[in-house]
Image: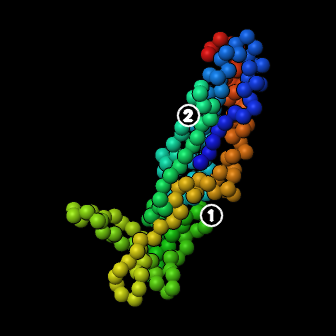
Amino acid sequence: MVVVTVDDKYDYIERRLGQFKAKAPKVMCKSINDTAKWARRELAKTARKTYTVKQGRFYKNMTIQNARYSSLEATIQSAGAPMKLVEFKYSAGKKTTKAQVKLNGGLKPLEKGGIKAFVNKISGKSQSGGGHTGVAQRIGPERLPIKELFSNSIPVMIGNEKEVYGIVEPEIEKKLMQYIESHIKKVLEGYE
């Protein structure tokens, strides 16, 4: 979860607005909400540079709770279960199945305890016989049962301090100040 708030900037905005200081809550709200939208885009872009998941998946998974005059903070939340390994880059070879979760990681063979993974149709739990393609692995020495393989969830990927959130977070404060200055200018020029 990412929280965008203004902390000590309210007095600064009132001083800058002078006779228009009654518009400070509006400037604050707009600046915070613009920053939250920017941060969501940046988090999705940065995550896409690290993981082999499409950028749209990251973007759609994050929701913004906008700031209001009564609550001058915006929240970006991401929720979700571990992702099926088939949603990442994978290769189903005759000898072994490989998958790549991170862009810089390359395709890695999927094998645990001498048991190789494979791509298979995973049956659905509905009577209609639905199902989906998945990367699976046998659990024991018999043909059945099998288990589908998963990787990190989108919230875990976005929250990665070294490669995603940690890169975007220092820029959030700078972007907030840019939006504050922009909205102050619009008020002083009579556009807001």
The quarter holding residue 41 reads top right
The quarter holding residue 140 reads bottom left
Say if residue 94 shows up in the picture. Answer: no
**Residue underneath mark 1:** 104
Q: Nearer the viewer, residue 28 or 141?
A: 28
Q: Residue at x 30, y 65 (%)?
A: 124
Question: Is 118 located above or below residue 166 in the figure?
Answer: below
Question: Is 135 located above or below residue 74 in the figure?
Answer: below
**Classed neighbour count for the residue bearing mark 2: other residues with Cα under 10 Å, few (<14), some (14–19), many (≥20):** some
Q: Which mark is residue 66?
A: 2
Q: Position of residue 80 (x, y in %)?
A: 48, 55
Q: Nearer the viewer, residue 8 or 192?
A: 8
Q: Nearer the viewer, residue 173 or 42?
A: 173
Q: Secondary structure at mark 1?
A: loop
Q: Residue at x 62, y 63 (%)?
A: 104
Question: Is 167 located above or below residue 6 in the figure?
Answer: below
Q: Nearer the viewer, mark 2 or mark 1?
A: 2
